[in-house]
Image (cartoon, rainbow, N blue to C red):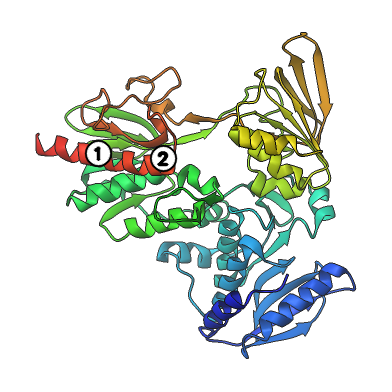
Amino acid sequence: MALTQEIKQQFAQYMALLEHPIQIQLSLDESESSQAMRTFIQEIASLSDKISIEETSLPLTPSFSLNRQNESSGISFAGIPLGHEFESFVLALLQVGGRAPKISSEAKERIQAIDQELHFETFVSLTCHNCPDVVQALNIMSVLNPKISHTMIEGGTFKNLAEEKAVMAVPTVFLNDEEVASGRMTLDQLLDKVSNPIATHSFDQKPCFDVLVIGGGPAGGAAAIYAARKGLQVGLVAKDFGGQVIETLGIENIIGIPYTEGPKYMNQVKEHLNQYKVDIIENQTVTKIDSNDLITIDLESGHQLKAKTLIIATGARWRLLGIPGELEFRNKGVAYCTHCDGPLFKGKRVAVIGGGNSGVEAAIDLASMVKEVVLLEFMPQLKADQVLQDRLNSLTNVKVITNAQTTEITGDKMVNGIQYIDRVSGQALSEDIQGCFIQIGLVPNTDFVKDQLDLTKFGEIIVDEHGATNLKGVFAAGDCTNTAYKQIVISLGSGATAALGAFDYLIRQ
């Protein structure tokens, strides 16, 4: 794939920032993929006089490593880093070339304190929007510590290796040839697997916040920004910043932004948030809230935080089927994101469970990659918009089964089948598959308040027009509430409403 003229111009501007010459070491053979990599690297090298090429032998072919002259960085790419990984490649070049990674001093200290040989491998797909976070984090660790190395492995190029290692979801990370993690992870979360944590939050010194926000999605971000703009002392606590939006590829309905992608958009929200004096407390999970004169929240870590008002914006998570095999085979054939994991199932027969918009969209997406899609829907008819059903019906490699009550996902080491009951005849049936994508909607993250707040039968927090709950001083916003529609723009407005509601509450106390 040739780079466009616009990308070439942008790349050349970035390469002007290199402080040291870069040597790209290429490991190639006579295969078509090797020749494609040669063309890609030659094109890249032609854009900067600070980049040179040397052919050598590396553990994987085709692959290349990025190094300074006579100094290994530990960073390698097995496969051409296009798509979402092109940014990872550019950042790696800049960092190997002397540009300092933009991370906290605490994270840098943790990385440099590691005193053991660590070799990471990350299996990715180029359509995965979660993979770059992991690849970039491990590349940073390699740049900052000579005992750490990292290879990005593109699953499509190394399909046999992915199958040998039973990789059925991306990103999947191996450390010294042992699988250690799968799914989107932050730098801090990856460091937790190999280093002793350094306290980044002194909880004993935390103030009593005017407004404390739980959740790092659009609703939480908007609530924190609106509260901070009122001059209030604001904290935001979240497991990781971004929420469910991080799982979203293309976003075309945020007014004023014709197109963006989930990770990019939430990075912009965080940058906006960082313009205000908001205490962002990440890698923390809230387990309980208590409301007396002040509101106290308990964290899984054992710490507590106090606030005058609380805004719960914990969003939602994928709804589970609750059947045998669903959890046992997660990342071993059971998946949720077709954009991320779909390419790993190329040429295979897969199932999609769910006939709503998300399920039908998933089936359409997968049909272009896999041998056949079996779509199972519990109800007598699909629930997706008619335009999506029309598109689905035009595909020749999709089999639709309605009135199907899925009872079990079967397998040995990997998924090999799905069992269901025909709700009309009562007959138990099965389909041979190698993968299963579950698309049956979301469930609100409200378990930790189910005994304190009024909830709907679906577990959503009931709020009034000001975002207030039944508990004094406690507000809620976004997909965890009984808002009629679950959309990013509505979550943003909901977060702003809750913040303004909390402000009005405070000035009346």
Q: Nearer the viewer, residue 362 or 264?
A: 362
Disc 2 and disc 1 in contact, CB within 8 angstroms? no
In the displayed image of the protein, which residue is found farthest to the right?
30
Q: Residue at x 76, y 8 (%)?
A: 426
Q: Is residue 22 left or right of residue 371?
A: left
Residue reaching furthest to the left? 508
Residue closest to the eye, 494 or 220:
494
Q: Between 141 and 47, which is closer to the camera in this rendering? A: 47
Query: Which residue is found at the position 47% from the left and 34% from the top?
Result: 316
Identity of the residue drawn at 58% across and 76% down: 6
Indicate which disc residue 66 carries: none
Give the SS element for disc 1. strand
Please name the residue that numbered disc 1 is placed on.
Answer: 306
Percent from the top left, x then y, of residue 406? 71, 21
Query: Label 2: which residue?
Result: 301
Q: Is residue 228 above or below residue 322?
A: below
Q: Could you tell me the amino acid type at mark 2? A: Ser
Q: Is residue 365 left or right of residue 443?
A: right
Q: Tell me the quadrant of the picture where the C terminus can be found.
A: top left
Element under disc 2: loop
List x then y, in percent, for residue 47.
63, 85
Which quadrant is home to the N terminus? bottom right
Residue 16 shows in this picture: yes
* Badge 1 amino acid: Lys
